[in-house]
Amino acid sequence: MTLSSRAFTLTLAGEADTIRLGQDLALALKPGDCLALSGDLGAGKSTLARALIRAIAHDEALEVPSPTFTLVQSYALRLPVAHFDLYRIGDPSELAELGLDDALDGGIALVEWPEMAGGDLPANTIHLKLETDGNGRKATITALEPQASRIERNRLIRTFLDRNGHAGAERSHLTGDASSRAYEYILEADKPRIILMDAPRQPDGPPIRDGKPYSQIAHLAEDVYPFVALAKTLRDKGLAAPTIYGGDYEAGILLIEDLGTEGVLDANSKPIPERYRASVACLAHLHSIAFPREIQVTETHRHAIPDYDATVMKMEAELTLDWHLPWKRNGKAATDAERADYLAIWDQLITELADAETNLVLRDFHSPNIIWRPEDEGVRRVGLIDFQDAMIGPTAYDLVSIVQDARVTVERDLVDVLMADYMALRHAQGPAFDEQNFRKAWAIMSAQRACKLNGLWVRLLQRDGKPGYMKHMDRTLWHLQVAFEHEALAPLREWCARAGIGSLNA
């Protein structure tokens, strides 16, 4: 199938606009992209290339020499960049010797004088032509999909900023996560730094159960309305969630408060006990608050907080059955009897949660999503930044998330301190807290979360080609062993022993 190309034409009033275009494109490019820069001498190719590379490096003073004589200049940045100048090559075949393919394997290539490559540049090359246009310049960008959609989205964000009081603002990469969301810093002279959330509405995936896609079954946020609703509600309840400064809700663009960059880990990525204890105190306070089930976001939109229901819990626990077990057995899947027994055990465990305490569950309350705010006091020292997928479910789940941090080892002595802190704080809130019942729910949700993650790490490896998450496997297997200490988990502990999974040495 032949893909059609799309063209974007921009007017650049001067050098500042050329630099800004380079900075913006740094946010649109992904590993494997080749950007071909063409235009007459003095049209601004070097200016744009320099701005783009410096933006990726987060270093406005980075030395970016012209590769005219070296032919290629490489930069080991968060997104590796190879800057080619092909003016002096004698034959397009020299591209292979210069390492273009290697540069595109995990990085991007900027190619000046692309016409010297003949037809040997990748078919999905992004072409950017700069031309003088009166006292300014004109930039024409031509691209195929998916690059064209990324560039279109990038231009939409710039237009949004220009129309909402941030014309000329510098955009700087902050982070992108495993989801469709990405984040940028918006920087302007003499103004506080703010954050732009780029979260375009996602189309439904294929149906996987009962005619529904995964996102609907798992109640994942598909637009920004849940984030806006919950940010306002959390702030109204006295918690430190970002202020929403504005946005285009339908387009999925938000401008939000920057809560800071300090986290709860030390320089060696180990938990700082004081900050973990404060995070648990914040969670205990949150669990004492009544939250509405529906939140008015705009005059025409209300967000209904979904339930963390049995369907979601069981489907997540099945990841161990479908991915971890075959991986542990060198590809041998569960037998029909094993599957039936495992699912029946989870049906019973979920039934035992019927009388568990429920409230707002943030769902990802762990180190990557907690900002430490030492200038504040009390629970507001703990900044909350990831809650768009929040549900109403067993409160024990979020305590599992922080005490059994999936990405950081929380040593057992600190685990015991955090658990004791939480119990003491909840008892201090009044006699209604049932510690025995809560500890049973904690053990069940600990096992459920560990079963989800132990399967997820394998799925990320085998299906998605992301082996880096396997480094967390031993930790989450240990978390499962801790859950097994509760008598309610005896049936699952025995099933895992028979199946040969769920232990560090199995």
Image: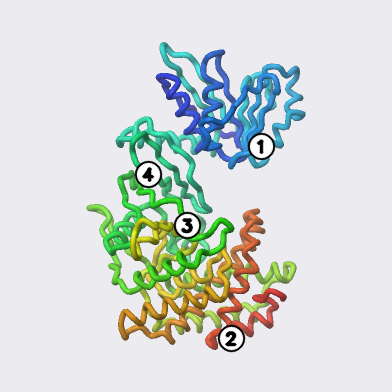
Q: Amino acid at mark 4?
A: Ile
Left/right placement of residue 264 relative to residue 119 reads: left
Marks 4 and 3 sit apart, C-alpha to C-alpha, by 18 Å
Residue in view at x 36 percent, y 69 percent: 360
Q: Position of residue 320 (x, y in %)?
A: 61, 71
Mark 4 residue element: strand
Q: Position of residue 438 (x, y in %)?
A: 43, 82
**Cβ atoms at labels 4 and 1 below 8 Å apart:** no
Q: Which numbered tag is attached to residue 104?
A: 1
Q: In this orientation, which residue lies closer to the viewer: 480 or 90?
A: 480
Q: Which residue is mark 4?
A: 194
Q: Which residue is mark 2?
A: 491
Q: Which residue is mark 3?
A: 263
User: Which circle's residue, 3 or 2, is located before the other in the chain?
Assistant: 3
Residue 5 appearing in the image: no
Residue in view at x 48 percent, y 32 percent: 23
